[in-house]
Amino acid sequence: MRWIVSGVLMLVAVVHALPLAGVLGAGKLLQLYGVPVQDPGLELLLRHRAVLFGLLAALLGYAALHPPLHRAALVAGLVSVVSFLWLWWSTGTTNAALARVALVDGVALALLVVGAVAHLRAGAAAAP
């Protein structure tokens, strides 16, 4: 079961590493999200967001190789994808790029649920 959790965390780490390209500027952010970023302050915030995604990706990837961190990484990944999906759904606004992000996050959510179930079953199997 542990290899399932590790595999899920690696895949979700890759998903979370993709937005890191946004640190390169407004052009890359437009390519990623289909939203023009013309305000310098907004560009700064979105580029910083890209860095935070990189940090989350690093945590997920590191945790994949260190089983004591599996639970924390699964929770972090779930919070990330569920929060985006909820915000995306609740705003009712989208474009093709954001719909693609939602689709990828939906797949990541399914993977994380599989990983969480595997993690819980492994813990139950190890209990006396």
Image: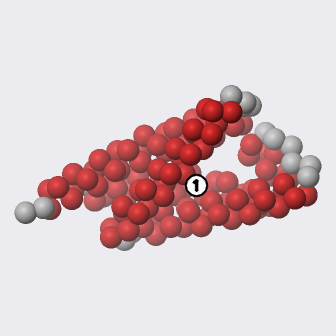
Depth check: give the residue in front, 123 or 100.
Answer: 123
In-front residue for pair 82/103: 82
Q: Where residue 35 sits: x, y (%)?
A: 81, 41
> Up-down: is 80 above or below 60?
above
Taking 94 as reference, is 8 above or below it?
A: below
Crowd around label 1: few <14 · some 14–19 · many ≥20 (10 Å):
many
Q: Can the viewer see residue 64?
A: no
Q: How is the image coloured?
A: secondary structure
Residue topped by disc 1: 16
Does residue 39 appear left or right of residue 111 in this picture?
Answer: right
With 99 as the anchor, is 126 left or right in this view? left
**Which residue is at the front of the view, 71 or 105?**
71
Residue 107 placement (x, y as % from top left): 49, 39
Q: Residue at x 74, y 43 (%)?
A: 33
Secondary element type, mark 1: helix
How far from the left and from the top, in percent, is residue 89? 61, 32
Q: Give the residue displayed 77% in from the left and 56% down from the top.
A: 46
Image point (68%, 33%), residue name: 91
Residue at x-position 91% and y-position 58%: 40
Q: Tell me the quarter of the picture where residue 6 sits.
A: bottom left
The quadrant of the rendering that contains the N terminus is: bottom left
Quadrant of the image containing the C terminus: bottom left
Q: Name which quarter of the figure residue 101 lies in.
A: top right
- Residue lying farthest to the front in this orientation: 90
Asked whether residue 37 appears in the rendered view, the answer is yes
Left or right placement of residue 30 versus residue 54 in this view: right
Three-letter amino acid code at the position of disc 1: His
Residue 106, horizontal then vertical, whole percent: 51, 38
